[in-house]
Structures are given as C-alpha cells and as structure tokens.
Image (cartoon, helix red, strand yellow):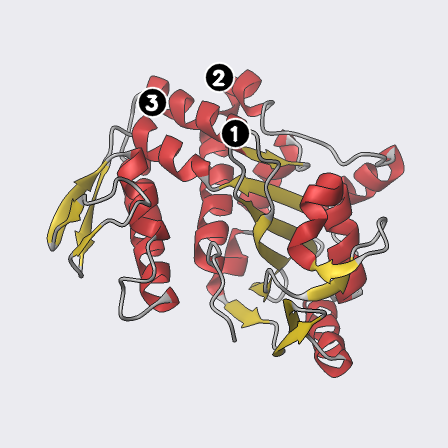
Amino acid sequence: MKKHKKITISILSIIFISICSFVFYLYKTIDNTVDKVYEPIDGETKTESKLRSENVKNKKPISILLMGVDERKNDVGRTDALIVMTLNPVKEKLQMISIPRDTRAEIVGNGAITRINSAYALGGVKMVLDTVEGFTGQKLDYYIKINMEALSGMVDALGGITVDNEIEWLDEGYYKKGYHYQLGNIDLDGEQALGYVRMRKLDPRGDFGRNERQRKVIAAIIDKGTSISSVTKFKDILETLGENVKTNIPLNEMVSIERSYKNTRNSMEQYEVKGEDAYIDGKYFFVVNEAERNHVKEMLANNLLD
C-alpha cells in the first residue's frame, strides 16, 4: 500500500483524551476559553443533540469521528487522517478504525467519486461526516477536528519539550533545511517538534518510525502538561486548542465522557481498513471492496451494542 502522510491513531486518541482531561480540570474557571473549541454541525437539530446528551448521561455506547486536518494559511486543507472511534463503557472497550486518506469513496452531498480526503475541501466537516457515514454505514455522534499545527502551539505553550531521539538526521525542510536532530535527549520548541514528527524518508523504518516519534512528542506534551500547576500555562494550552481544535461535544458532555467512559481505555482495539492500490483514470486510489466495508460496518455495530 502507498505510504500515506497521516497523523496516527495514537496521536489523535491521546489528543482527544488530553482535551477532555484539561477541560475537566479547568472548566469552572476558564470555560470562556473552552467555548472556542465548540462548533456544532451545520443543520443539526435540537432533537439530535438532546438524544446524544441523553445517551452520554445514560452511559450508552457512542461514536466519534477524529479528523486530522493539515490546514495552513490560504489553504482550506484536507484530512490527513480519518479515525472512527467507538466507546462502549459496558464492555470497557475503545475501538479505533482508521480509513486511509486516499480511499476511493462517494463524497456524499457532492456526488463525486474520488479520494475520501477531498470531502473536507469540498464541503467542510458536515460533508466529511456524511461521507464517512455513507462509507461505513454507521451514524456518527460526534466529531473532533484537529489541525496538525496545534502540535506546535501546544509545545510552545508548555515552554518546549524533551524527547529521546533514536536516529540522527539533517532536516530536509520540514523544520529548517540542514537542522541537526542529534541522537539522545533533545530539547524541541514547537516548530522543531513539528519537523520531528513529520520526517519520514530519512527514517529506515518509514511510517513506523514516524509514528513512534509522534507518540514520543505527545507523551512528552502530556507528561509536561500534567505536571504544570500554573493556570496561566493551562490557559495558554487551551487557547491553542481553541484555535486548532473544533468539536461538537458540548462542555458538559465532554466532562461526562471523561468521567464515565474512561474505563473504555482498559481494552483498545485498533484496525486499519484494508484494500488495494489502484490507478483509475491516471489517479492513484486505495480501493476497498464491498466485503471489507461490510466487515468494518459489523465491527462498528458490535461495539455500539448496549
């Protein structure tokens, strides 16, 4: 399968958990900052939002679409990662199913049959949700959209991080051309950290090596973030999240999820949708057959059973 530039399942799930934890700790004092994160879905009815709220209150299984978006100045961006996450507090199981960014799918609401990561540029969050629901055959309760640039902002808000670097290389331009990432413990600011997690070609392990570096950076963010006692520092982090993270999970439901669904981390299932590489009309696609789509649909449905 063609190597894809993507944020890993681990990164998205850990950022989601950290958002809930930070908000739970600070919501009484800086909820005005938290409000920046909240962005409801276009056209959503009060009945739909009320039903979701009741499901969370009653500890019913829920589904969340995690979207990793690489948005830059003057560029609407595309989704680098699409992860369907289901949380079942009764089974104490968290399930994450990754849909490759080049997956060939119908863009619901547009009619085009093209790469699934085009949905965001064509119609924003709503079109991504509709398209993923059409592809998986599963209704999604919530979404969390994370801009990759948030990683840099979070590191800077913390005053930098330290990671144990296992390979040495000279940067090719992800951070600064010629910058030396040395072996051993290295200190990184936000831009250096972003370059550190984006590099792939110089790593003999390819995507696997990059995934490990991403996990190290996130682990360092969490480790340093949870040791900070300054409300000002936490506020800086939340302000960064407010600019780079959007979700339709209201504050009270976010707190409830953190409290009532944390046991789902006891059993974590990760799965990447399978398919084949193909060139159609001169364009590369990742093609998923009907049997695999049905398998994914069944997996999701099973973890959403009460």
**Left or right of residue 179, residue 232 in this image:** right
Q: Earlier in the sequence, mark 2 or mark 3?
A: 2
Are there few (<14), some (14-19), or many (20+) residues within 10 Å of tag 1? few
Q: Amino acid at mark 1?
A: Lys
Between the C-alphas of marks 1 and 2, the distance is 32 Å
Q: Secondary structure at mark 3?
A: helix
Q: Is residue 274 above or below residue 195?
A: below
In the picture, residue 40 is in which quadrant? top right
Tag in front: 2 or 3:
3
Mark 2 — residue? Answer: 29
Are there few (<14), some (14-19), or many (20+) residues within 10 Å of tag 2? few
Whether tag 2 and tag 3 are in contact, CB under 8 A, the answer is no
Towards the viewer: 234 or 153: 153
Mark 3 — residue? Answer: 233
Q: Earlier in the sequence, mark 3 or mark 1?
A: 1
Tag in front: 3 or 1:
1
Towards the viewer: 299 or 151: 151
**Left or right of residue 48, residue 117 in this image:** left
Q: Amino acid at mark 3?
A: Lys
Between the C-alphas of marks 2 and 3, the distance is 13 Å
Whether tag 1 and tag 2 are in contact, CB under 8 A, the answer is no
Q: Amino acid at mark 2?
A: Thr
Q: Secondary structure at mark 2?
A: helix
Q: Is residue 190 above or below residue 58?
A: above
Mark 1 — residue? Answer: 73
Q: Earlier in the sequence, mark 1 or mark 2?
A: 2
Towards the viewer: 282 or 204: 282
Asked whether residue 138 is in view, the answer is no
Q: Residue at x 79, y 51 (%)?
A: 130
Between the C-alphas of marks 3 and 1, the distance is 26 Å
**Left or right of residue 220, residue 260 in this image:** right
Q: Residue furthest bottom?
A: 291
